[in-house]
Image: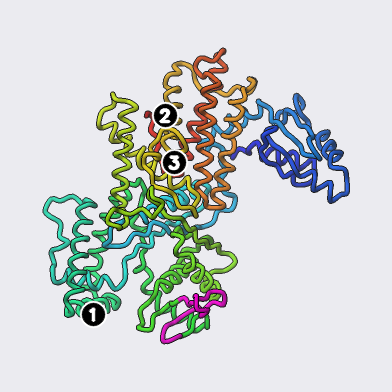
């Protein structure tokens, strides 16, 4: 179905045609919209702004002469205050309701975007530091895909490096340490337990036994040389880790597919060529045996240049070699025109140098947009990075389990008649939604406090508040009996109906803005505004007890469209919407 122009877009076009310039339209407290473009036009033409404004008003049909604008007035030095007709609001919302996409248009010129997010490390437990990259990246990919963009997910897992020589060598000498017991299901907890046991035992041996250390270092050489036996054992660590990763992401309600996982090892075959091309082009030079890229504006505290080290003096490759190879792959092979990196703020300098090096050699051109989307830290209630009492990063699974447990308490208190099975299902939807929303409602660059009591609250800016608003709508629709949602443009709208309707009409514009700036918190903020407007609507406008059958139908229509908007918006944030709470 064709997309539905928003009321603001329709007003923008109508006033622009009458003014002959950009009206600089925005929402207003005095009317529905205010156009500020008259002042600039009058100044350029050396005219009286109020006279120009009066001419625009005269050129615009209003009231019964037009189905869009109810009234327009001049205020101050030439501002235009514009009120949309009730009928136009209802008609536009009806067109949105008739479309599965709620009238949201697909992007006119979709491209291909690679989103690099969710980067756990093989053979290591996932901790709170992996939360934001996973949640933010998942939301951005969903929003971009809904807008029509082709999105390629890339999970750049840590699956390569010197530690694997130690792990593989230990497994050679203790061959049954990763074996599964007969009949055992592939459970993440057991997999992580095995991996953790091997990691700790091999590390202890590596630190205490010089001969084992020597054998481990030789094994690194074998791994990098592609020795079949070494690679096969390395692959066992990767596969065991995937069982664990998938179990955590299943709890987090984020889909991770095998084909999206291209870790550091995925670019091994490109590393030597990447270094050769950089050196031959002069972009990188040898410095004390290492292959480096230098930058005039990046210096250390001593005033000396801080280089990007692509290849170390001993021949080993740094992260830069892998990241530059990934850029080559993503632009040349995947034909991406946008590269997004959802990685914490501490990596800002690294990515600045990598992107500049890639531009210098031409792997990043003017046709390719590349952005590091840095995010802040998850804090404890003490305002410091969230850690356990022992001072180590909190396990991600522990946070997820605790959130579900807290949500179960809230759900039981709300409805004591629910079975434990129903409580468990809803607690997962509410608890995980609470964690995601707390993260996504915070602007990317800011830190936020991990406070489960606040996150699972039924009041305030929480996902539970939004989920409850949706469940309440579903309840009203079930109680409506024979009355069905139906738009009635002929009916006048109460102030709360108008406010809710104008907000619902902004859904497409909101999504377009989020997709352009990659800021999911703006979608979260919009959805909270919708839920808040819905609460006012309920309070001031009885739905099932309205005066006339037509008013009941019209208010059911508004409630239904609000529910669909909340559901679609929360789905794009990766948050479930239970039918009942």
- In the displayed structure, would residue 142 be above or below residue 228? above
According to the picture, the residue beneath numbered tag 2 turns out to be 471
Front-most of residues 540 and 179 = 540
Neighbour class for label 1 at 10 Å: few (<14), some, many (≥20)? some
151 lies left or right of 238: right
- At mark 3, the secondary structure is helix
The quarter of the picture where the C terminus appears is: top left
- Mark 3 vs mark 1: give the one in front: 1
Q: Quadrant of residue 29?
A: top right
Residue 125 appears at what percent x and percent y?
Answer: 28, 58
Q: Quadrant of residue 273?
A: bottom left
Residue 270 appears at what percent x and percent y?
Answer: 40, 74
**Disc count in the image?**
3
Q: Residue at x 73, y 40 (%)?
A: 35
Front-most of residues 62 and 101 = 62
- In the displayed structure, would residue 35 be above or below residue 556? below
Q: Say which label, 3 or 1, has the lower sequence index.
A: 1
């Amino acid at each position: 179905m064709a997309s539905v122009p928003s009321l603001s877009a329709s007003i923008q076009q109508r006033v622009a045609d009458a003014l002959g310039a950009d009206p600089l339209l925005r929402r207003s407290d005095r009317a529905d919209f205010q156009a500020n473009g008259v002042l600039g036009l009058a100044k350029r033409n050396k005219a009286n702004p109020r006279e120009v404004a009066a001419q625009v008003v005269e050129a615009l049909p209003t009231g019964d002469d037009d189905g869009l604008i109810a009234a327009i007035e001049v205020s101050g030095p030439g501002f235009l205050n514009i009120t949309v007709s009730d009928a136009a609001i209802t008609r536009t919302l009806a067109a949105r309701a008739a479309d599965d996409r709620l009238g949201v248009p697909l992007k006119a010129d979709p491209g291909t975007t690679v989103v690099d997010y969710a980067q756990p490390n093989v053979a290591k437990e996932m901790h709170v530091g992996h939360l934001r990259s996973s949640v933010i990246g998942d939301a951005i990919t969903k929003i971009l895909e809904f807008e029509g963009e082709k999105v390629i997910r890339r999970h750049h897992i840590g699956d390569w490096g010197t530690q694997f020589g130690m792990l593989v060598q230990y497994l050679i000498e203790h061959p049954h340490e990763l074996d599964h017991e007969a009949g055992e299901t592939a459970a993440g907890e057991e997999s992580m337990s095995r991996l953790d046991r091997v990691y700790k035992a091999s590390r202890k041996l590596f630190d205490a036994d010089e001969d084992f250390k020597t054998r481990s270092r030789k094994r690194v050489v074998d791994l990098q040389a592609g020795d079949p036996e070494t690679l096969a054992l390395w692959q066992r660590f990767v596969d065991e880790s995937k069982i664990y990763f998938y179990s955590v992401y299943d709890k987090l309600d984020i889909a991770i597919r095998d084909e999206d996982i291209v870790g550091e090892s995925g670019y091994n075959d490109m590393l030597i060529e990447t270094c050769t091309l950089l050196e031959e082009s002069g972009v990188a030079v040898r410095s004390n045996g290492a292959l480096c890229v230098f930058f005039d504006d990046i210096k250390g505290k001593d005033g000396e240049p801080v280089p990007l080290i692509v290849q170390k003096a001993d021949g080993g490759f740094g992260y830069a070699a892998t990241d530059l190879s990934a850029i080559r792959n993503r632009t040349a092979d995947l034909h991406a025109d946008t590269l997004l990196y959802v990685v914490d703020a501490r990596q800002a300098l690294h990515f600045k140098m990598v992107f500049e090096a890639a531009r210098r050699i031409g792997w990043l051109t003017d046709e390719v947009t590349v952005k590091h989307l840095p995010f802040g830290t998850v804090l404890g209630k003490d305002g410091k990075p969230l850690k356990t009492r022992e001072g180590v990063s909190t396990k991600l699974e522990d946070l997820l389990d605790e959130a579900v447990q807290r949500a179960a308490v809230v759900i039981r208190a709300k409805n004591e008649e629910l079975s434990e099975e129903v409580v468990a299902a809803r607690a997962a939807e509410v608890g995980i939604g609470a964690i995601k929303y707390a993260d996504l409602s915070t602007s990317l660059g800011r830190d936020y406090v991990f406070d489960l009591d606040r996150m699972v609250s039924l009041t305030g800016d929480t996902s539970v508040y939004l989920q409850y608003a949706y469940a309440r709508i579903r309840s009203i629709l079930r109680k409506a009996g024979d009355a069905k949602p139906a738009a009635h443009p002929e009916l006048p709208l109460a102030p709360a109906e108008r406010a809710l309707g104008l907000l619902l009409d902004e859904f497409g514009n909101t999504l377009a803005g989020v997709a352009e700036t990659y800021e999911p918190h703006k979608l979260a903020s919009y959805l909270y505004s919708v839920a808040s407007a819905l609460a006012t609507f309920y309070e001031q406008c009885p739905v099932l007890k309205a005066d006339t059958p037509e008013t009941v139908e019209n208010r059911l229509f508004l409630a239904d469209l609000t529910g669909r908007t909340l559901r679609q918006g929360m789905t794009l944030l990766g948050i479930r919407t239970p039918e009942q709470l």
